[in-house]
Image: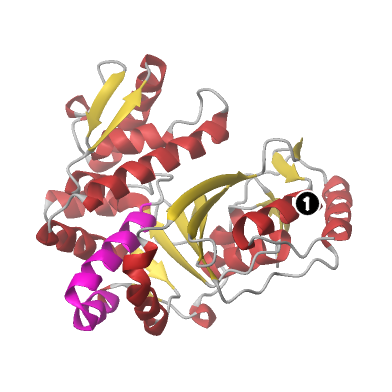
Amino acid sequence: MSKKKKRRKKMSGAKKAILALAIVFSILLLVAMGGYGLLQSYYGRSNFVKDSDVKLAEGLNLEDTGLLAEEAAALKQKVSEAIFGIELPNSESVYNILLIGVDRRDDSWYGNSDSMILVSINKDQKQIHMTSFMRDLYADIPGLGVQKLNAANAYGGGPLLVQTIEENYKIHIDNYASVDFSAMIDIVDLVGGITLDISDEEAYSANESIMEMCSLSGEDPNLHYFSGGGTIHMDGYQAVAYARIRNIGNADYERTERQRIVIGKIVEAVKGLSISELNNMVNEMLPEVTHNVEETTLLSLLTQAPTLLGYEIVQSRVPYDDLFTSSGGMLVPDFEATIQRLQTEIYGESTVG
């Protein structure tokens, strides 16, 4: 067994970096040049799963919400009243796909969705809107009740996570694509690395993550440690470690910012790859992608690819800074105001009010 395959088998999901966006971008770019035959070839290598084939997990050890049972029940009632009667927008000009970064240690479960980015293509506004949903968001998950949002994927995979976001945050989601980021290190290396600014404090924290990842993969961490901060061209281990930093600054808020920085750098690097390099990257990643995107939908995106690649990219995060409180270990949005803003950002209008 090659070293690369050994690493992929042992590495945990590297907690973030929605590389699915880079994969989607690469596929669209390649297929636009190679045609429908290439699309069929790539599609056959990906892991298409019907929603009906995804079964609920058993025996999960869920994270503590920090709430007593009566507190959770009271919060559920309050949120239910706030969102009652709010309809999901319906627009043919908007396509929503949820990109999921999964962290799991083995194949016995679906894994926590530590990174969730809703990519919304609005043809009227000529925008691609990327909305990050934080892992500790409040959610009333079908079959589980009040839990952190990332538990939905652990319990029922992509389909249940999509259903949970739709029911709690009133956004229709057309499809999802999920990636276990055990392959992230290889992808960053395949694009030739990425250049990022990192502080001394971030470098120190990232080195702890590098040590953890290398202990799992059998890699020598001394080959990847940061010597300090600065503008650094990072390899896969370094980029993943940077993206995993959570204990510096404003915790998960800054972590989602780092995710989006890494995404942008990877997409930028993908644009500079040759056709053969793009092909290698796509073939490397496709078996890692689990999704429910029908081939006809992907073909439709393909025909729009030259236009879509020129759209403005807009980014945001839920919860919004001024629209949430903390309850136990969860982030609880002001639901009515949050849904109104979220729908307006994605659709240009809202069903609230």
Query: What amino acid type is highlighted by mark number 1?
Result: Phe
Identify whether 298 is placed above or below 211: below
Identify whether 93 is placed above or below 109: below
Q: Residue at x 83, y 54 (%)?
A: 79
Magenta part of the chain: 19-44
- Compared across the picture, whether 203 is left or right of 329 comes to left
Q: Quadrant of residue 240?
A: top left
x, y percentage for residue 278?
A: 18, 59
User: Is residue 319 a member of the stretch shown in magenta?
Assistant: no
x, y percentage for residue 185?
A: 26, 45
Q: Quadrant of residue 245?
A: top left
Q: Is residue 225 visible?
A: no
How would you rate the neighbour count of disc 1 (Cα within 10 Å): few for under 14, some for 14-19, many for 20 or more?
many
Q: Is residue 280 visible?
A: yes
Residue on which disc 1 sits:
335
Q: Quadrant of the N terminus?
A: bottom left
